[in-house]
Amino acid sequence: MESLKYTLLKIIHVSGLTFLEPVVRLCYGEEPQLQLKKIGRFIVIPSLTFLAFLVAWALIAPVYKTKSGEVPTPAVVWDAAQGVKRFHERESDKQVAYGLSGDERESSLAAVSEQRAILNSLKADADEQVAEASEERTALVAEEMEPLATAYETKKAEFKQAEKRREAALIVKASQIDQRDIDAKNELLAYIRGHEFQTEQERELLKQLKAEQDDVRNLTYAPLQNAMRLQTEIAEKEQYLAKKEEILSKANRSLKLEEEAARLKELKLQYAATTGPDLMPIAQQMLQIEGRMQKIVDSEYAKPWTLPMQIMRSLACVFAGFFLATAIAIPIGVLCGVSPTFMAAVTPFIALFKPVSPIVWLPISLIIVGGVITDPETHWLMVGMSNLPLIGWLQINPAFIASAITVALCSLWPTLVNTALGVASIDKDHLNVARVLRLNFFQRLTKIVIPSALPLIFAGLRISLGVGWMVLIAAELLSSSEGIGKFVWDMFNNGSSETFAQMFVVVFVVGVIGLLLDRIMIIFQRLVSFDGAPAAI
Amino acid sequence: MSNPAEERYVEMSNLIKAYPNPYGDDIKVIDGFNLKIRKGEVVGVIGHSGCGKSTVLTMLAGLNPITSGGIIVDGREISGPGPDRAVVFQSPCLLPWMTAYGNVKLGVDRVYPHATPQMRHDLIAYYLGIVGLSDAMHRYPRELSGGMQQRVGIARAIALQPKVLLLDEPFGRLDSLTRMELQDVILEILDREKLTTVLITHDVDEAIYMCDRVCMMTNGPGAKVGNLMTIPFERPRHRAEILEHPDYYNYRGELICFLEEQEELKGDRPAKPEPKDGVGEDTHTDLVAQEDTSTEIPVLNDELESHVTDTEMVKVN
């Protein structure tokens, strides 16, 4: 039991999840009061502030209205996240369905038909509910409209009469004025102005009444909205099931193959039975079918990019850039640390290029990559990578490479500077050990210099990865390289309230992934820090 | 030992070390240092702190360039550092990313490049064993106490099988009990391996207990060998026997006299306040104080008191 406790504490220490420490200690009954106090500080307080943040968000968001609808509340964002997840699951499901064959296909098809039947009854219910709610709403609106409408009509008639009365009175007054009586004329003008003002005010009032009526007419009726949401959901599911059914039946790979195989067999029989020049077209036809069959075997369901896939591609891209940066930064950093002359030679470049924004690097690298890989469809590198087993589906293209290069260019600086610092600040005593042992340059590097600089190198790598992740989203957004950035861009261009909410989902996805990457780097940093000192959080 | 080559196994002749001062003149810290060391001899170098003891040692180690003069070890003039002259510094300076085993292995791999892995392992285990670290072999320096770290440093130095072992105040940072333990560990190793050794120290008792000859250095700048004293106690030595030996206080008195003379030559510098704990501190004021009380020391010299260091003796008095 005790050893388990120490293992747990060690894991917590290495992973930097120190807020869990009081929980473990409390479970073992160690100073409960102190642990509770710590739990209060490191778990309860942060949870409460997060909760307060959610509440404030939920209250403030609906106030602000945009052309993409209201700013989404936490609940709407959660729904959007579910929607993103559902989309991914359904697409994956269709992909599987395309590859099914034999009994599996048939049982799956039966299941889908069953589901569709159930859905149809649900759909009827939903339609009914919508109709009902709609009726209820109409009734409600009518009920609320009636007094408003009457009030409006009465007021309108009243105002019309009043206006007519005033006009008649003014005409009478005008007819009584003498031609030279300027004062009376001025007085009349004042009366007419008063009349116009009155009329204008009455018109405003009527407009206001009309607006009230419009509000009632546009009333949002919660039951109707819920019913309609359910209806849409069912419709979407219906669409998905219909598509899946199609994929399982006539668009299925195995079925298409069977069909072709049957035709081929027929042709073969024909070929065996025929002699003379007729053989030629039959043989050609057979070869054609064989070619088509090969294509079908290789074919895959044309799955659209879903957010989880885009996340994977973004991760692949950030690591590609990060490893490229590491491969450049560490050797140069070591050289800088070892040789002050080299450091002096490199310093202007570091100073000059470090502050350059990713937004500048991206177009440059896009053009350069585009110049090297002029035809991505046939370039050996692109073709080779699309045939690789694990990363083939990522569809690595020039935009991906340009994004990775941008990430590398922006994220190599912290590693470079830290490596140089780590190597330059190596303990003189440790170098004396190397001198006494007469280690050669390579041995000195591997046995003394690099191990001694590792903690600082990893501190730099950690910053680099964080920078890279931030840069990547922007790079993808601009380069239209499939990934999280592209997802955001697509959602922005879509401009509906649903996609607006999905952009908020991305905020959290990016944040959580960035956090995880940082955590992983902290663990590495801890593992290489020989002095046992905890890395900064 | 009559072989002339063995008589002059290490020879430092007319050694000069000069550093430029801010006005561009050269200050000769060491000026005309001459010393011959026999093979297998343990020579102590004693002097006030700042007199240039460590400078001589680092020059012998090759870590510090020589301004003028020459050092010959085993018939060859040295140039730069090398594994034939292993150093144990005041701070252990182990590589913190390697275990005790790894630290010793680094040297062993270098000195025995053609040995089989098994032989190397045996060597490493042997040397860690003789400094008493068989159980702590795979621990990292941060997990070891100061004394244990210094033991690793000693094992690392001896494992190189050097021609000369250079000890630069190796016990300076240790507490008095650990210091005595380590003195015994080193003496035992020196008796067994018969290594030619130079021991830098400012502890008079340590010098008498461990060395065959003590080289007393004059104060810098321009430090040189002021006096040489042979300590003919039989080896292996035992602390209690040495302390009770009738000649012990004669040697001690001579050393302290020399050091006090040096202090007086410097002019009437105000005596420094007594350090709170003697560990790793400059102890020359203690030595002066000790001389006054040296007649009373035999009274304290029983089983327990023999383990008390200089400083603590002063405090008792």
Image: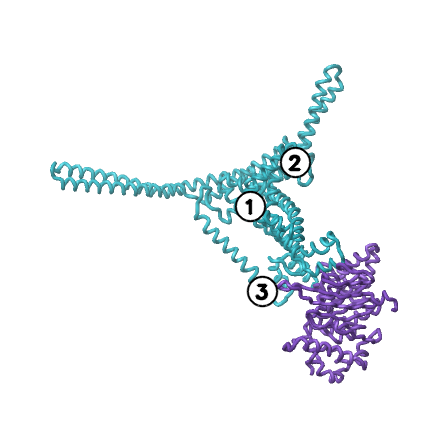
Chain colours: A cyan, B purple
Look at discs 2 and 1 and give the one toward the viewer: 1
Instruction: Tell which of A246 and B295 is nearer to you.
Output: B295
Q: Is residue A60 left or right of residue B185?
A: left
Asked which secondary structure carries label 2, the reply is helix
* Percent position of residue A358, x then y: 56, 44
The numbered disc on residue A382 is 2
Task: List the single residue furthest toward the top.
Answer: A276
Q: Check if mark 2 and mark 1 are on a common chain.
A: yes
Residue A189 in percent (x, y) is at: 19, 40
Residue A490, image x, y percentages: 53, 39
Give the residue type at disc 2: Met
Find disc 1 in the rendering and name its residue.
A356
Between the residue at mark 1 and the residue at mark 3, the CA separation in whole angstroms equals 48 Å
Marks 2/3: CA distance?
57 Å
* Mark closer to the chain start, 2 or 3: 3
* Residue type, mark 3 in image: Leu
Tell me whether the residue at label 1 lies in contact with that at label 3, contact meaning CB atoms closer than 8 angstroms: no
- Same chain shared by disc 1 and disc 3: yes
Q: Are marks 2 and 1 in contact (CB under 8 Å)?
A: no
Q: Indicate the chain on which mark 1 is placed.
A: A
B191 lies above or below B81? below
Q: Is residue A43 above or below residue B208?
A: above
Q: Nearer the viewer, mark 1 or mark 3?
A: 1
Q: Which residue is mark 3?
A: A36
Q: What crowding class fits label 1: few (fewer than 14 Cα within 10 Å), some (14-19), or many (20 or more)? A: few
The answer for how far apart the CA atoms under marks 2 and 1 are is 29 Å
Residue B145 visible in image:
no
Chain letter of mark 2 equals A
